[in-house]
Amino acid sequence: MKILPGMAAVLAALVLIAAPAAAQDRATGLKLDSDKPIQIESNKLEVREAENVAIFTGNVAVQQDKTVLKAGRMRVYYKKDGGSATTGSADIDRLEVDGTVYVRSETQEVTADKGVYDMGREMLVLSGDKVVLTEGANVIVGCKLTVNTRSGLAQLEPCSSTGGRVKMLLTPGESRAGRGN
């Protein structure tokens, strides 16, 4: 099973909210459609201009086309002197999500306890007691998934609770069937 950079897509897609020009460059590598709208819902939004952060809390749901992110909380940190979050001109530094993180793309799902997307390094890290990536009947389990969204290189680290091993279940033919090939 190939780990798609698209699993990071929703996190990276949030760039479109505050930095459209930068987002178009990143979106191309992540196969996002910058023309598609992004919908964000949460129970509360707090913008702390002095701290350069916007905080979405309570049943956070982000959707762009067929990619969905759900979490308990999402913090969007933007660069100092990089614009304003309230006007949509902020230059995003990093995104953090926590509280049962769930990401679904067209063919894959991943769950974790927390996640961080570093815009400058183009690195996504999902971690927790258990990180589970599924594509159809194929399943990979570990505790820390690191994806370089620029190169597509992914690494899954094991959990100490599983004896220090990553677990993988592959069902022959399932990956192709899941992608419609």
Image (cartoon, rainbow, N blue to C red):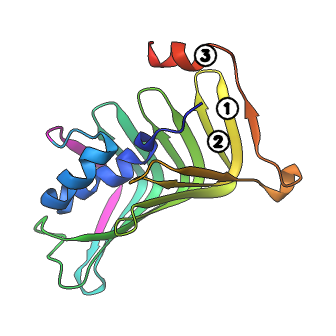
Indicate whether residue 89 is drawn in magenta. Answer: no
Residue 97, horizontal then vertical, whole percent = 47, 60
Q: Which quadrant would the C terminus be assigned to in this image?
A: top left
The number of discs equals: 3
Circle 1 crowding by C-alpha within 10 Å: few under 14, some 14–19, many from 20: some
Please say if 85 is above or below 36: below
Amino acid type of the residue tagged 2 in the rendering:
Val
Residue 139: image tag: 1
Which region shows up in magenta?
35-46
Circle 2 crowding by C-alpha within 10 Å: few under 14, some 14–19, many from 20: many
Q: Nearer the viewer, residue 49 or 6?
A: 6
Q: Which residue is mark 2?
A: 132
CA distance separating discs 1 and 3: 11 Å
Residue 96: image tag: none
Q: Which quadrant would the N terminus be assigned to in this image?
A: top right
Amino acid type of the residue tagged 1 in the rendering:
Val
Tell me the residue at 76%/46% (across/down). 166
Amino acid type of the residue tagged 3 in the rendering:
Glu
Mark 1 in CB contact with mark 2 (< 8 angstroms): yes
Q: Is residue 131 left or right of residue 86?
A: right
Circle nearer the N terminus (1, 3): 1
SS category of the residue bearing label 1: strand
Please say if 36 is above or below 43: above
